Image (cartoon, rainbow, N blue to C red):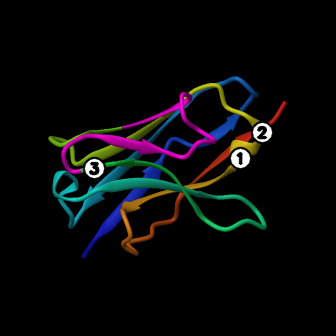
């Protein structure tokens, strides 16, 4: 019923940038708080960014000032612009409706010199 497909990950050098996309079906993103999460090897999944129904945003302290979450309601797609990437940003990135469990496959981000 609900499908979230992440894309845009890859291998980048420290200081590089990536833009992740989350194409949604079976859910209207403008009617839900939407979030990006990440999970690094050996660590718990963590919330990195959230966009609220009204458009305001929240970020984990570790990414504040470097990452920007946005949405295109006409395309029913959520984005995560990541700048100034650091090796500690390496993880599988997932999008989801906040506090829901519509998990997709995620997209791998690797930051390495």
**Image: magenta residue range:** 53-69
Instruction: Name the magenta segment's main secondary structure.
Output: loop
Sequence order check: which comes first, mark 3 or mark 2? 3
Label 1 with label 2: CB-CB less than 8 Å = yes
Q: Quadrant of residue 104?
A: bottom left
**What is the x, y in percent for residue 24?**
29, 57
- Crowding near the residue tagged with mark 2, few <14, some 14–19, many ≥20 C-alpha atoms within 10 Å: some
Which mark identifies residue 87? 2
Where is mark 3, residue-wise?
52
- Crowding near the residue tagged with mark 1, few <14, some 14–19, many ≥20 C-alpha atoms within 10 Å: many
Q: Quadrant of residue 110?
A: top right
In the image, residue 35 sits, relative to residue 44, either above or below, namely above
On-image quarter of the C terminus: top right
Q: How far separated are the C-alphas under marks 1 and 2?
A: 6 Å
23 sits left or right of 109 in the view? left
User: In the image, which is nearer the foreground, mark 3 or mark 2?
Assistant: 3
Query: Residue at 48% of width from left, 47% of height from top?
Result: 7
On-image quarter of the N terminus: bottom left
Label 3 with label 2: CB-CB less than 8 Å = no
Where is mark 1, residue-wise?
90
């Amino acid at each position: 019923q609900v499908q979230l497909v992440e894309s845009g990950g890859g291998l980048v050098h420290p200081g590089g940038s990536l833009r992740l996309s989350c194409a949604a079906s079976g859910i209207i993103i403008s009617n839900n708080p939407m979030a990006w999460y990440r999970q690094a090897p050996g660590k718990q999944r963590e919330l990195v960014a959230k966009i609220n129904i009204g458009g305001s945003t929240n970020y984990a302290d570790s990414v504040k000032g470097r990452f920007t979450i946005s949405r295109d309601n006409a395309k029913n797609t959520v984005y995560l612009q990541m700048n100034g990437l650091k090796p500690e940003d390496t993880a599988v990135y997932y999008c989801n409706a906040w506090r829901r469990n519509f998990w997709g496959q995620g997209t791998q981000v690797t930051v390495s010199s």
